[in-house]
Image (tube, grey):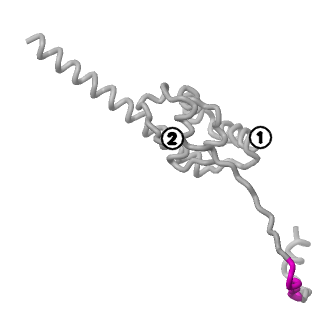
């Protein structure tokens, strides 16, 4: 470790002269390109509030609508039920183990490390979606009970 510190503090730093090279006049320069495929979105995503009813296409549309591009690649064949199971693993599993497993899956499936920021946002959005569903169900039950009470009177 001390040797590393000595090397970092070394004052003998050799400089390399860089000479710019001008291309010949009639030379075409072709730069390498990298192609990244992003799953296509359907024209107009319409989502049921019940995540369990979502198809694979709806899951992909929902992920892409929320700019979760990496998650959309990782969860390519997921439907709504699969999202619920994943959400449970994330919520109730051991965080380090779940994160490691997701990281391994991400590297294997997408050849990229999983973004913790994107995973956190995904988890937050799923929580919000589940709360919205619970609120809707509660409202429907309350209206139904109110209507039943009026009919009984």
Which residue occupies the foreground of this view, 80 or 24? 24
- The residue under label 1 is 108
| Quarter of the view holding residue 93 | top right
Which residue occupies the foreground of this view, 24 or 53? 24
Residue at x 64% of width, y 32% of height: 77
Q: Is residue 11 visible?
A: no
- The residue under label 2 is 62
User: Is 3 situated left or right of 29 in this image?
Assistant: right
| Quarter of the view holding residue 73 | top right
- Residue 109 percent coordinates (x, y): 74, 40
- Confirm whether the magenta stretch covers residue 19: yes
- Residue 118 percent coordinates (x, y): 58, 49
Residue at x 77% of width, y 62% of height: 33
- The mark that comes first in sequence, 1 or 2, is 2
Which residue occupies the foreground of this view, 7 or 151? 151
Specify start and end residues of the magenta stretch as a single range. 18-27
Q: Work out which quarter of the rendered image holds the N terminus and state it.
A: bottom right
Q: Work out which quarter of the rendered image holds the C terminus and state it.
A: top left
């Amino acid at each position: 470790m001390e040797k590393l510190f000595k090397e970092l503090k070394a004052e003998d730093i050799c400089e390399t002269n860089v000479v710019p090279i001008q291309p010949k006049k009639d030379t075409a320069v072709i730069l390498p390109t990298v192609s990244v495929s992003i799953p296509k979105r359907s024209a107009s995503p319409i989502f049921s509030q019940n995540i369990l009813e979502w198809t694979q296409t709806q899951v992909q549309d929902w992920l892409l609508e929320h700019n979760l591009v990496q998650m959309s690649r990782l969860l390519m064949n997921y439907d709504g039920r699969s999202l619920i199971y994943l959400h449970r693993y994330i919520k109730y599993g051991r965080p380090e183990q779940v994160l490691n497993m997701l990281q391994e899956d991400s590297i294997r499936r997408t050849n990229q490390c999983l973004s913790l920021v994107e995973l956190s946002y995904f988890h937050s959005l799923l929580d919000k979606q589940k709360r919205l569903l619970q609120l809707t169900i509660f409202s429907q039950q309350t209206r139904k009970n109110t209507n039943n009470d009026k009919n009984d009177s």
